Image (cartoon, helix red, strand yellow):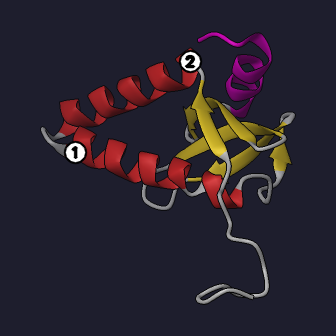
Amino acid sequence: MGEGQGPYPPQTGMRIELSDEAEQDLIDGAASYDLREPGIGNYFLDCLFSDIDSLSFAGGIHPVIHGYHRLLSKRFPFAVYYEVDGLVVRVRAVLDCRRNPAWIKRRLRQGGS
């Protein structure tokens, strides 16, 4: 082994892709929190992007709900729904867990709001 190398190859992580719908979900969520208190929307985005970034190494370990892996946010009542295709994590939606479960299921199946 070369200097500074462990017994395993270096982890490069997975590439993360956000769907247009997931991007809009994040924008809508931030706007909603900013209506409650200005500035919280930015904190919301920072937290959710941190959660999403963790998928580069943890993608695929979360339970499958409604046909997608579901990562629960650490700070907000939101869930990140995603699928793994090889070394790509495709984020399908970022949804408020306080919504009606039937609405969430329909949204994931239809692809729109």
Q: What is the secondary structure assignment of the residue under circle 1?
A: helix
Q: Which residue is mark 1?
A: 40
Q: Amino acid at mark 2?
A: Glu
Q: Which residue is mark 2?
A: 21
Instruction: Say whether residue 99 is visible.
Output: no
Instruction: Say whether residue 15 is visible.
Output: yes
Main SS, magenta residues: helix
| Mark sitting on residue 61 | none
- Pick the front one: 11 or 67: 11
On screen, residue 35 above or below 52: above
Tell me the quarter of the image containing the N terminus: bottom right
As for residue 103 lying within the magenta part, the answer is yes
What are the residue bounds of the magenta stretch?
101-113
For label 2, the crowd category at 10 Å Cα-Cα, with few meaning under 14, some 14 to 19 and many 20 or more, is some
On screen, residue 55 above or below 3: above
Please tell me which residue is depicted at 76% across the width and 18% down the height of the picture. Answer: 106
On screen, residue 4 above or below 91: below
Please tell me which residue is depicted at 77% across the width and 56% down the height of the picture. Answer: 62
